[in-house]
Image (cartoon, rainbow, N blue to C red):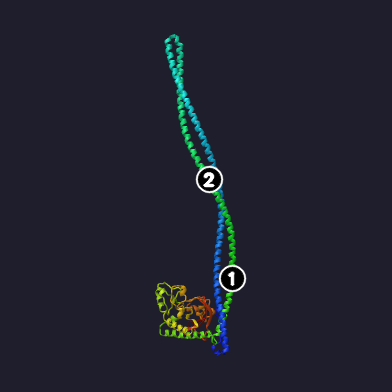
Amino acid sequence: MSISHDIKSDEHVSELPESVQATLQSMEEVMKDVASRAATNQRDLMQVDQVVSNLNGMVTETNQTVEQSVEGISQMAERLTTVAAHVEEVEAETGEVGHVAESSRSYAQRALSDITRIQEAISDLDEKTRKVLGISGVIKEVADTTNMLALNASIEAARAGDYGRSFAVLAKEIRKLADQTRQQAQNIVEDLDSVMRQLEIARTVSADVGESVEALNRVVTRSHESFTAIGQVISDAAGQIAETAHLGEQQQDHMSRVADTFDTLTGDFHQVAGQLNQITDHVKQTAQSMEYGYMELAHYEYQGMVPKARQAAELAAVEAQELIERKISAQTTSKTAVLSLGLYRPFERNSIKTLARYFDVSAVMDRESLDPPKYQVPYEGALEDDLNLMVQRYIEQDRSWILFSVVDLNGYVVACADVDRVGLTGDPRLDDRNRFKRLLPHPSWVRGGRTGLGESVEWLPNNLSRDDFITHGVALKRPVSPLPPLIQTYIRNNVTVMTLLSAPLYVEDERFGAIMVAWQ
C-alpha cells in the first residue's frame, strides 16, 4: 500500500543548519531501522501465513479423508453385520446338512448291515437247497431201484401164473408208485435248479447293492466329514467377522472423534489466520508510515541516503528520457513501440541465442524456454544496450546502490546493472538472480514499477496494456506538478533488507515507467 500526500515543493526548502541535518539523518536511520524490522516482520508473517495456510489445507484435506474414512468404515461395519447374519444362516444350514449327512450315513450303514444279513441268508438257503437237491437224487435212485425191483417182481409173478397174479398186481402198483416218485423227484430237482439260479441272481444283485451301499456309505462319510470341517470354518469365520464388525464400530467411533478434533483444528487455524491478518495489517500500517516519512525526508537537503537516492533517480530519469527520445527521433525505434505495454513474447529456443549480447547463455542454448522466463518487447534491441551502460555507470559512481534499474509500468526490467545480468546456468534457483528482461511479480516491484500511481492501482493484475491502465482511471500523461517518488523497504530474495526509491520516467510526456534505486 502506498500513501499519497501533498508534499511541500522544493522551493520552500533551503539550506538547513547542521543540527537540523543531523536530526534528519537520525530520523532517517530510525525510520530505516523501523522499516527494516517491518519488512522483516512482513516476510516472516508471509512465511508463517503460508505455513498456516498449508497446514490448514492439509488439515482440511485430512479432515475430508477422515470423514470419507468414517463413512467407509460405517458402510463396512453395516456390511460386516449383514455378512455376519448371512454367515450365521449359512452356519445353521451347514449344520442341518451335516445332520442330514450323519443320518444318511446311519441309514447307509444299516442298509449295508441288512444286505450283509440278506447275503448270509441267501448263502444259508443255497446250502440247504443243495442238501435238498442231494436228497432228491437219493429219492430218484430209490425210485429207480424200486421200479427195477417191481419189474423183476412182475416177471416172477408172471412165471408163477395164477399163484403170482396178486403179487403181479402189487408189483404193478409198486412200479406205478416208483414212477410217480421218480417224476416228483425229477420235478423237485428242476424246481431246486430254478431256485438255485434265482438265488445266484439274488446273491449277485445283493453283492452289487452291497458294493453300491458301501460306496454310498463312504461318500456320505466323506460328505459328513467335509460338512463338519466347513461348519467349523464357517463358525470360525462368523466369529472373526463378528469381531471385525465390532472393531469396525470401535474404529468408526475413534475416527469420528478424530474428525471432531480436525474440525476443532480447522477452527483454530481460522482464528490464527485471522490474528495473522490483523498483525499483518498493523505491520503494513507501520511500513506505510515509514514510507510516508521517507517521502517527507526526500524533500530536504541533508547528508542522507533518501535525498541522495532521489537526486540520482531523477537525474537518471532525465538522462533515460533524452536517450529514448533520441532513439525515436533517429527512427531506431518508434514511440508506439516504446510506449506499448503488455506485448511480451517469451524467449524460446530460436531466440535465446540473441541474449548472448547481454550475458552468457551457452548453458541454456538447447532449452525450449527459460526458467524463470524472459520476454522480448516491440522495441527489442533498440534501447537496452545504452540504458544498461547508463545504469552501470550510476552504480559504479556510488557503490551505495545495490540495485539500479529501468522498468516499465508492469515491472518489466528494461535495463539493469551487470550484477543483475549474470550468465544463465539452467538452474532456476541460480538463474533467478538474473533480472534482465523479466516480469517481476513481487508486489514491491509492481508498486515500484507503477511509480506514483498510488493505491488506486494496487489491486490491478500484472501485464496490463496502456488501455487497461487508462480504463481503470490511471493518468499516464505527465502532470503539471511533479509527482513525488515512491519509497519502500522490503526484503530482496527473502535475504537482504533494502530500501527502494522509484522516480517516474516519461517519454514525450507519456509515462513509460520508472528509475528504481535501492540501498541497504
Farthest-out residue, top:
162
Does residue 264 appear in the picture of this structure? yes
Q: Does 302 sit left or right of 332 as displayed?
A: right
> Which residue is pictured at 60% across the width and 61% down the height?
257
Q: Position of residue 188 (x, y in %)?
A: 46, 24
The disc labelled 2 sits on which kind of residue?
A: Phe
The disc labelled 1 sits on which kind of residue?
A: Val
Q: Does 367 sit left or right of 267 as displayed?
A: left
Closest to the observer, 14 or 86: 14
Examine the rendered structure and indicate whether residue 218 appears above or below residue 283: above
> Which residue is pictured at 58% across the width and 59% down the height?
252
| Residue assigned mark 2 | 227
The answer to whether marks 2 and 1 mark residues whose Cβ atoms lie closer than 8 Å is no
Could you tell me which quadrant the N terminus lies in? bottom right
Q: Secondary structure at mark 2?
A: helix
Total tally of numbered discs in the picture: 2
Q: Does 385 sit left or right of 502 as displayed?
A: left
Q: Position of residue 343 (x, y in %)?
A: 45, 77
Within 10 Å of the Cα at label 1, are there few (<14), some (14-19), or many (20+) other Cα atoms? some
Q: Position of residue 337 (x, y in %)?
A: 43, 80
Closest to the observer, 507 or 46: 46
Does residue 507 appear in the picture of this structure? no
> Which residue is pictured at 44% across the width and 85% down the height?
323
Closest to the observer, 15 or 60: 15
Residue 11's image quarter?
Answer: bottom right
Q: Position of residue 330 (x, y in %)?
A: 40, 85
Q: Secondary structure at mark 1?
A: helix
| Residue assigned mark 1 | 272
Examine the rendered structure and indicate whether residue 442 appears above or below residue 133: below
Q: CA distance from mark 2 to mark 1?
A: 65 Å
